Amino acid sequence: MNKKTILITGGCGFIGTNAAEYWLKKGYRVIVFDNLSRVGAKENLRWLKTQKGLIFVRGDIRNSQSIENTFKKYKPELVLHLAAQVTMVTSVKKPREDFEINALGTFNVLEALRKEAPEACLLYTSTNKVYGEMTDLEVVEKDKRYEYKDFKGISEERHIDPHGPYGCSKCTGDQYTIDWSRIYGLKTVVFRQSGIYGPHQFGIEEQGWLAWLVNAILFDKPITIYGDGKQVRDVLFIDDLLKAYDFALTNIKETKGKAYNVGGASFSLSIWELFDILEKLSGKKFKYSFGDWRPGDQKVYISDISKAEKDFNWSPNVSPKEGVEKLYSWILKNKAAVKRAGVFAQNYPIVK
Ligand SMILES: NC(=O)c1ccc[n+]([C@@H]2O[C@H](COP(=O)([O-])OP(=O)(O)OC[C@H]3O[C@@H](n4cnc5c(N)ncnc54)[C@H](O)[C@@H]3O)[C@@H](O)[C@H]2O)c1
């Protein structure tokens, strides 16, 4: 029997590598499409190449021909569109590249789907940044964290108000993905994610805050806290996220054309709370200084995941303590790869 095929754009990134492993275990032929621009992508590829049933295509989503040819050649049944410029800071420095990758690149992927695999299901990974700073929401200051005042979390009913080039470009991809279902009847679904963490994550100062702090403590590097350290994010361990991808794609009749907020919900951490976990695990103390709040930084972001719970019966299981311990031991075992990847370099490149 022929194997089913899944195409993962950005498949050498953190989420992509874990997704590749997940669908390989499910017996799929896995096509990983990536331009290897991300810090750590080459290390992930080195690991992926040890897995049977995986095909790597080096390509760039900004090149419409390259992505169309990949759809034409492999005719996937499932597509995870993860490839992106992922940092707010880089997007401010290089807004055109950010737009070309996240907005135009997503358009290219959707057009390749429409032309070459219109029956396939596609999941696009958007971000909570589509909702902007949300300064109207009242927060209360506690000892080690901010909290919403009388408010559960952000639902998909919240109006879109992206801040910064990254917010705008990801939001463009988000809206096109929804619309390609409305206009062309394609089976597309959008996940608005917040902080995801887990193995194969090469956290840098600009993105992947949880893994960045694990790197800092394990390599004895000083860090800057932008703001006061009480900012809170919900945190979702990668295994929980991959189940959500799977459930949403399996229930595509229900989920198509919709956007879902997918985050840790009741699982959340402030920087100080993560410090506590990591200082206990490592027996070391963080070296840190303070910097200004970064533009668009929310004091609290917690997802309301009721829609995902209702539509595809999903909620997260892995607690921050358990998840952080898993990430910590992965980085501890892979210190050489993390070092080679250059997570402490300045000015991470965008591949032209
Ligand atoms: N990790 C999170 O916490 C989080 C939160 C919200 C949204 N997301 C979204 O999820 C997706 C995956 O995130 P991740 O954490 O795995 O990021 P990542 O940076 O680890 O992976 C992205 C991958 O895309 C590749 N890539 C970048 N530009 C490309 C291009 N032009 N053509 C082909 N490949 C390209 C990179 O080399 C990298 O391997 C992204 O779309 C991101 O915006 C992630």
Image (cartoon, rainbow, N blue to C red):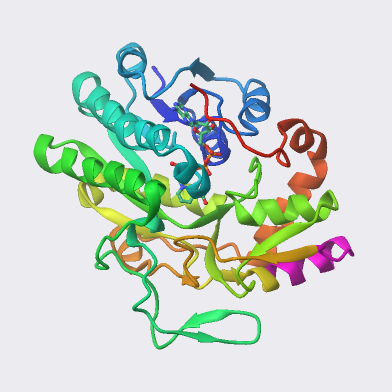
Residue 126 in sight: no
**Along the line of sight, which residue is nearer the eye, 242 or 168?**
168
Q: Residue at x 40, y 88 (%)?
A: 150
Q: Residue at x 25, y 26 (%)?
A: 113
The reply to whether residue 186 is in sight is yes
Q: Nearer the viewer, residue 22 or 55?
A: 55
* 119 to the left or right of 122: left
Residue 334 percent across, percent down from the top left: 78, 38
Decide whether residue 288 is among the magenta residues: no
Residue at the spot 81% in from the left edge and 64% down from the top edge: 286
Residue under the point 52% across and 24% down: 351
Magenta span: chief secondary structure: helix
User: The N terminus is located in which quarter?
Assistant: top left
Q: Quadrant of the rendered structure where residue 25 is?
A: top right
229 lies above or below 213? below
Q: Residue furthest left?
A: 183
User: Could you tell me residue 94's position as x and y percent?
Assistant: 46, 37
Residue interval drawn in magenta: 274-287
Q: Position of residue 189 (x, y in %)?
A: 28, 45
Q: Is residue 29 above or below residue 333?
A: above
Q: How many marks?
A: 0
Whether residue 280 is in magenta: the answer is yes
